Amino acid sequence: AVAGVLRAELDRRDAHPIGAREAVEGALERLEFCSDDTVRLGRLAVTGVAIEADLAQRARDLGDAAAEAEAMARAATMLGRAQAAAAAGRPLETAYAATAEAHHDRATGTDPGTGWADAVAEWAKLDRPLPQACAWRYAAEAHLAFGRREEATEAARASLAIARPLGAAWIVEEIEGLAARARLSVDGVGVGEAVAVGDGAPANGSGATTGAGNGAPTTGDADPFGLTPRERQVLTLVARGATNREIGAELFMAEKTASVHVSRILGKLDVRSRTEAAAVAHRLGLAAD
């Protein structure tokens, strides 16, 4: 079970969600054949829900309704496993189930409300800081998606405050990228400063929480949205949080021209804001590193 979780997380961070899905399903098949260990079942199940949430978000980005429906159905099945493992009310399984419920909201595109804060509270009872940092990171993303910028800023700061002392560089980079894309002010935690990489901790952005991350392979010119090379350059800067003026200065074009490019990109990606465009670029690896 533990090997399956770790393999799945590595595949998530390397932007191989199907491989991650297979790692979880293979581990579940072996574990359920020989054991009723609810701790390991819960851990596998919450990882499975997170992976399906990644896949559902990606499918929505691409307008693939069939893939989205499949991912949501799989997420519901995995959530059921997590909740069954937590039925006895033991604290670790309860924390896994609370996290799985919040990821399930991510899979369905539903506002989690206090879901991520509830997950943080369960992990805090167990004195598990790394899952708390991960939960705050997803909370920040959810608050942004539903227009709560102040709450998103506070959640991002909370995640950084935990992740930096742990040396969890991949979480720090995820939050820094999110803050740049959404132009959040998280200065109180020193965003943008160098962070030491802990033993074995990958220095790329993790899907442990959003999918492709900074270490994801880009799609080259064969993206599914028909972006021109120039638009890809503009999107890269949008993903870094650049304004139209900054894009114009970087790419030697007028600010008005930059604005036109951004408008065309929003139309091609079928999103309403620069933040949403940046999130799509981040999840699908469309912006050059």
Image: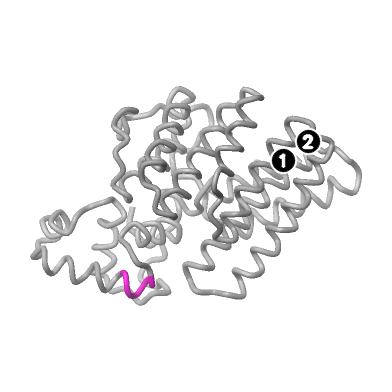
Magenta stretch holds residue 30: no
Predominant SS along the magenta part: helix
Which residue: 41% across, 41% down? 151
Q: Is residue 30 above or below residue 262?
A: above
Q: How many marks?
A: 2
Residue linked to disc 2: 39
Residue 50 location in percent, x, y?
61, 50
Name the spot of residue 99 as percent of width and height, x first: 63, 42
For the question of whether residue 177 can be seen, the reply is: no
Q: Residue 139, image x and y in percent? A: 49, 43
Expressed as whole percent of the image width and height from the top left, the position of residue 21 reads 67, 56
Which color mode does the image show? Answer: one colour
Left or right of 199, for residue 172: left
Q: Secondary structure at mark 1?
A: helix
Q: Is residue 180 above or below residue 268?
A: above
The reply to whether residue 38 is in sight is: yes
- The quadrant where residue 37 appears: top right
Assign a secondary structure to mark 2.
helix
Q: Residue at x 52, y 55 (%)?
A: 15
Label 2: how many Cα within 10 Å (few below 14, some 14–19, many 20+): some
Image-based side of 135 in relation to 72, left or right: left
**First to last magenta residue range:** 266-270
Q: Residue at x 59, y 68 (%)?
A: 68
Q: Amino acid at mark 2?
A: Val
Q: The residue under label 1 is which amino acid type? A: Arg
Kindly identify the residue that appears in the image at 31 percent across and 55 percent down.
Answer: 239
Q: Local crowd at mark 1 within 10 Å, few (<14), some, or many (≥20)?
A: many
Relative to 196, is 72 on the left or the right?
Answer: right
Q: Which mark is residue 43?
A: 1
Closer to the camera, 196 or 141? 141
Q: Nearer the viewer, residue 171 or 3?
A: 171
The answer to whether mark 2 and mark 1 are in CB contact below 8 A is yes
